Image (cartoon, rainbow, N blue to C red):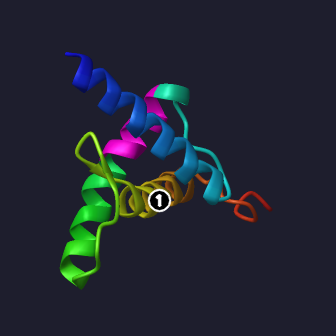
Amino acid sequence: MLGFLVMLLVAAIIGFIGDALVPGTMPGGWVGAILAGILGSALGGYLFGMGGLPSGPVITGLAIIPSIVGAAIVVWLVSWASGQLSGSNRY
């Protein structure tokens, strides 16, 4: 149980880092950040695995660098889909 909670905390931190790297915001606060971190971890792991890139350090089963890259992609996609990217609200 403690390992799961630590994984959620790491996912939230990764989600907030991904949110900080991309213009726009991830809706949902902590829950949105956790979801972006978990989905970003899966997406980043898949993309890095396909490219044969090293995953770097791993904390509680989440590879940090691919997770941050994946979380940034997830935040960008959600921001784009919701129209929150800068420049998209001009009209």
* Residue 15 rendering spot, x and y as whole percentages: 48, 44
The residue depicted at 29 percent of the width and 67 percent of the height is: 55
Side of 82 where 20 appears, left or right = right
* Residue 53 rendering spot, x and y as whole percentages: 28, 80
Q: Residue furthest front?
A: 57
The residue depicted at 70 percent of the width and 63 percent of the height is: 88
Identify the main secondary structure in magenta. helix
Question: In this view of the protein, can residue 81 be seen by the observer?
Answer: yes
Q: Give the vertical position of 89 relative to 46 (above or below).
A: above
Side of 75 where 56 appears, left or right = left
- For the residue marked with disc 1, what is the amino acid? Leu
Q: Is residue 29 magenta?
A: no
Q: Give the vertical position of 62 relative to 53 (above or below).
A: above
The residue stretch that appears in magenta: 31-38
Side of 4 where 67 appears, left or right = right
The residue depicted at 48 percent of the width and 52 percent of the height is: 78
Q: Is residue 35 magenta?
A: yes
* Residue 19 rendering spot, x and y as whole percentages: 58, 49
Question: In this view of the protein, can residue 84 be seen by the observer?
Answer: no
Which residue is identified by label 1? 77
